[in-house]
Image: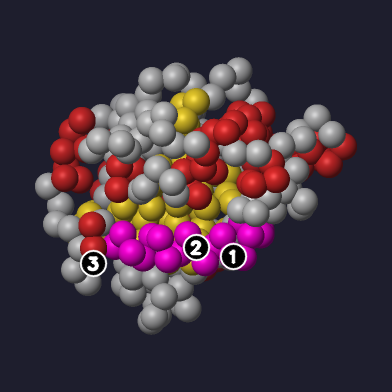
Amino acid sequence: MLNTILSPDHHGEDFSSEVMNEIIDLDRYPIHELDGRLGKALLENCRQSLDSLAASSLHGFLRPDAIKRAQLAMTELLPKSYRFPNVPRKTFPFPDPNVAKSSFAREVRGKKHNNSNNQILNYQIPNNSELRAIFLWPPFVEFIRRVRRVETLFPSQCPHLALTSKIAFEGDTDGWHYDPNDGVVTLLLQQPEAGGEFEYAPNIRSDSDENYSGLKALFDNPEKEARRVDQYAGTLVFFNGRNSMHRVRPVGPTVKPRIVIIFSYDLRSSQLFGESYIRMIHNLKQGTLI
């Protein structure tokens, strides 16, 4: 895993706005000029959408040619990707001390939601990747920090999960779950011909109310109860998933898989992901295996 994560030979941090404008549509989204009139309006729109709907989408964030290059780069890495089998995922990251008192709560929490896709890890993505250039570019990091209203923000230092890609083929899904924390940032590179939509229930739970009746209604009838984030190739999405149950719907018949990039940042400058999860990934088989 040499010469991989955020190593000094990668020059993306030094890219000028002129160079990055060939990758990101800075004319439409001036993230490098956040104190200007348009930059301030962009920040406010993202914050308002996150506050009210738990999600904010920026369509066309990536230039069309950059989308094509990124699609090709991820497709070429597929043989090295790790295949998550179609098994139940962890839906609830937080324990509920009251669940023992309610059979209804146990029923809702006990429902299984499967997860299957291919994942490309950070160390497998070349240092000269334009996706890594985006991930490390200081104006992009600062944009995310100000959208999230935090004092500090740093790219994750994890050699495995700092920058990753999930690729979903026909039948693949990312089942219903909450995130341990808010602040997920993703970039959709390719949408399949059918299925693969991102669905969620904004702020369906709170720290004082798990709202199991609302969750049951969501699980039983997502077509009625869930919202969908409109995404197209090149869409950047901010999402707060700690209190918003969400999933990626099963991918339908398609020639093109769903390809999404996940950028991981943290308030700490030396954040790493847990070793047990990393070991689990490395025990998975590599390749598409669909």
Magenta part of the protein: which range? 58-78
User: Alpha carbon of mark 2 to alpha carbon of mark 1: how far?
Assistant: 6 Å
User: Alpha carbon of mark 3 to alpha carbon of mark 2: how far?
Assistant: 20 Å
Q: Position of residue 103 (x, y in %)?
A: 28, 44
Check disc 1 and report the residue beneath it.
65
Q: Amino acid at mark 1?
A: Asp
Q: Position of residue 271 (x, y in %)?
A: 37, 24
Residue in the image at 52% along x and 66% along y: 68
Q: Position of residue 139 (x, y in %)?
A: 64, 34
Check disc 3 and report the residue beneath it.
288
Residue in the image at 76% along x and 33% along y: 34
Q: Nearer the viewer, residue 80 or 211?
A: 80
Q: Quadrant of the C terminus?
A: bottom left
Q: Nearer the viewer, residue 234 or 2?
A: 2
- The magenta stretch spans residue 8: no
Q: Which of disc 2 and disc 3 is earlier in sequence?
A: 2
Classify residue 215 as left or right of residue 272. Answer: right
Classify residue 225 as left or right of residue 26. Answer: left
Q: Amino acid at mark 2?
A: Arg
- The magenta stretch spans residue 74: yes
Q: Compared with residue 34, is residue 269 higher up or lower down, i.e. above or below?
A: above
Secondary element under disc 2, as helix, strand or loop, is: helix
Secondary element under disc 1, as helix, strand or loop, is: helix
Is any atom of residue 217 visible in this view? no
The answer to whether marks 2 and 1 mark residues whose Cβ atoms lie closer than 8 Å is yes
Q: Quadrant of the N terminus?
A: top left
Q: Nearer the viewer, residue 51 or 289?
A: 289
Q: Which of disc 3 and disc 1 is earlier in sequence?
A: 1
Label 3 Cα neighbours within 10 Å, binned few <14 / some 14-19 / many ≥20? some
Tell me how the rendering is colored.
secondary structure
